[in-house]
């Protein structure tokens, strides 16, 4: 029988003997080997003599700070992860610790249950008190099914290279990440890439569209509920936090959350625990938080629509995703990547190539809908093109992207005599296919405008939810929604 692996080796650094002893005893009971130090100098001497699996350090030490230890570890290219303990009510120190490379942080007075959970998470161990949650099928998607999010962040531009570099840096820690960018830029892909490159990649990735959940259901959806907690609660149900246990919780369009829910979310983040509706006690959760918004959250804070303390918690590390119009040099690579996926999903082979004329036509477009709009255009082009290549005539954008050159002209500048001839309209060779393409495009735009809430999108078009579902199924539109 092979010998068991040695217990993880930890170094605890704190200048208060009573606290240091408390941390040591707690960790020894968990089966760890523990050394301790009371200053930066003592800690560094210990680090020079041994390799550790984890460093746990107080922020304030007699001869410096815990951040100095982190800086030395970084300069020496040491592999130890670090957890920093900060004073209560000092979010600036916590943010600084995470930006300096700490895996996670704790605030004083330290909750020992939380302490054990954070240490276990840093060492890749599941906390004994909490079982990984069963993830609802509609919210969990594996990296294999997605084909690798980092690979789908196509483009060799300097802006996208910076995004990929930042993803690689932040993935290894527990630091909250805020992804900012316009709608359709690929913020969820960035969040998935952070998850897939992190030590949590084997855990669930739970994506939540905050703007698509009715306000009265927010608490139940986020924190879960117990059977009988309210009318219709016929069984216990996990919320998003429990579903993401051991993995990553992605909160898309977090700026759309109402203020009361922001307060409850802040408490869940601070306590690393949630109380399901109807429950007496809290349930510990271990989920890495990644959020996203197209809004300027700093402005939302100034205008009173977003809590400042929650903003500080979320905006530890920010990744800005550039709009497509600012990286048009990436168009050829993005088009190739999208066409490969669209053709594969549609069962089309070989994958059509995109002609230079089509690329030129696309480059003239402003792309207010970013990569998502480009994907819709290519869906349409693939449906209309009957060839092995996609030309400018298949793209569906007029030359120069001018839909009506006289629309903005004053009336007195138009010729007084003889009205302008009506433009010739090309008749489709397959009317049903043409109508399907038009209908699909309208449905996609309505769904995008209402953040894939099918009920709201259907109502805006005068359709019931049942009619909307039928049309989406008939036209092959992904039914993943926030209804």
Image: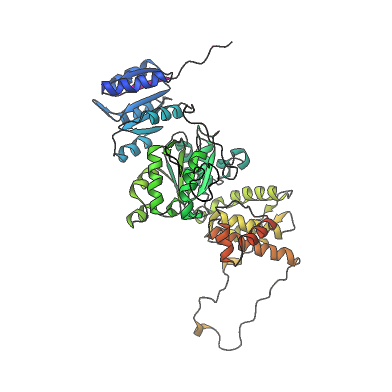
Residue 42 or 467: which is nearer the viewer?
467
Please determine whether, in this image, residue 355 is positioned above or below residue 169.
Answer: below
Location of residue 148 with respect to 386 vertically, above or below:
above
Residue, x 56% and y 44% (percent of image)? 139
Residue 66 found in image quarter: top left
**Between residues 362 and 348, which one lies in front from this camera angle?**
348
Q: From this viewpoint, which residue is outermost toward the bottom? A: 417
On the rendered image, what quadrant is the N terminus found in?
top right
* Displayed quadrant of residue 112: top left
Magenta highlight on residue 265: no
Give the image location of residue 59, x and y in percent.
30, 30
Judge left or right: residue 225 versus residue 464. left
Q: Is residue 290 visible?
A: yes
Q: Quadrant of the C terminus?
A: bottom right
Residue at 35% x, 35% y is 97
**Residue 212's x, y, as percent?**
51, 54
Highlighted magenta segment, given as a residue range: 1-13
Q: Is residue 312 left or right of residue 367?
A: left
Residue 16 in the image: above or below residue 266: above
The x and y percentages for residue 119 are: 42, 27
Tell me which corner region of the image, top left, top right, bottom left or bottom right, holds residue 114. top left
| Image spot of residue 425 (x, y percent) | 69, 73
Is the magenta region chiefly helix, strand or loop?
loop
The residue drawn where x is 62% and y is 62% is 441
Outermost residue toward the right in this view: 429
């Amino acid at each position: 029988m092979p010998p068991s692996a040695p217990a993880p080796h930890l170094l605890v650094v704190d200048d208060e003997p009573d606290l240091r002893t408390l941390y040591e005893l707690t960790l020894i009971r968990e089966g760890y080997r523990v050394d301790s130090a009371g200053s930066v100098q003592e800690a560094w001497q210990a680090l020079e003599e041994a390799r550790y699996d984890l460093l746990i350090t107080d922020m304030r030490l007699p001869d410096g700070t815990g951040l100095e230890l982190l800086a030395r570890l970084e300069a020496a290219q040491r592999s130890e992860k670090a957890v920093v303990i900060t004073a209560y009510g000092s979010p600036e120190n916590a943010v600084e610790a995470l930006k300096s490379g700490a895996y996670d942080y704790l605030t004083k007075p330290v909750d020992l249950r939380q302490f054990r959970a954070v240490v276990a998470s840093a060492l890749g161990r599941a906390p004994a008190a909490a079982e990984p949650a069963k993830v609802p099928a509609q919210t969990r998607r594996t990296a294999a099914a997605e084909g690798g999010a980092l690979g789908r962040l196509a483009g060799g531009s300097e802006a996208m290279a910076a995004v990929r570099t930042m993803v690689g840096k932040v993935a290894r820690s527990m630091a909250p990440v805020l992804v900012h960018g316009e709608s359709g830029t690929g913020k969820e892909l960035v969040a998935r890439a952070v998850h897939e490159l992190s030590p949590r990649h084997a855990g669930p990735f739970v994506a939540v569209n905050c703007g698509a959940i009715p306000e009265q259901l927010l608490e139940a959806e986020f924190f879960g509920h117990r059977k009988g907690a309210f009318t219709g609660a016929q069984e216990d149900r996990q919320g998003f936090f429990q579903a993401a246990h051991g993995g990553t919780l992605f909160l898309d369009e977090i700026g759309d959350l109402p203020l009361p829910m922001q307060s409850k979310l802040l408490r869940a983040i601070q306590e690393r625990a949630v109380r399901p509706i109807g429950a007496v006690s809290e349930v510990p959760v271990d989920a890495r938080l990644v959020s996203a918004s197209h809004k300027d959250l700093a402005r939302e804070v100034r205008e009173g629509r977003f809590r400042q303390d929650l903003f500080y918690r979320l905006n530890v590390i920010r990744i800005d995703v550039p709009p497509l119009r600012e990286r048009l040099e990436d168009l050829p690579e993005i088009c190739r990547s999208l066409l490969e996926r669209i053709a594969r999903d549609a069962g089309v082979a070989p994958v059509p190539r995109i002609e230079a004329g089509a690329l030129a036509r696309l480059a003239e477009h402003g792309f207010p809908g970013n990569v998502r709009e480009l994907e819709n255009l290519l869906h349409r082009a693939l449906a209309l093109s009957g060839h092995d290549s996609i030309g400018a005539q298949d793209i569906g954008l007029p030359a120069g992207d001018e839909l009506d050159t006289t629309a903005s002209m004053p009336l007195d500048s138009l010729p007084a005599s003889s009205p302008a001839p009506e433009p010739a309209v090309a008749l489709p060779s397959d009317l049903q296919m043409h109508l399907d393409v038009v209908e699909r495009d309208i449905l996609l735009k309505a769904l995008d405008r209402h953040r894939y809430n099918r009920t709201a999108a259907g109502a805006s078009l005068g359709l019931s939810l049942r009619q909307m579902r039928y049309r989406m199924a008939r036209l092959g539109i992904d039914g993943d929604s926030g209804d």
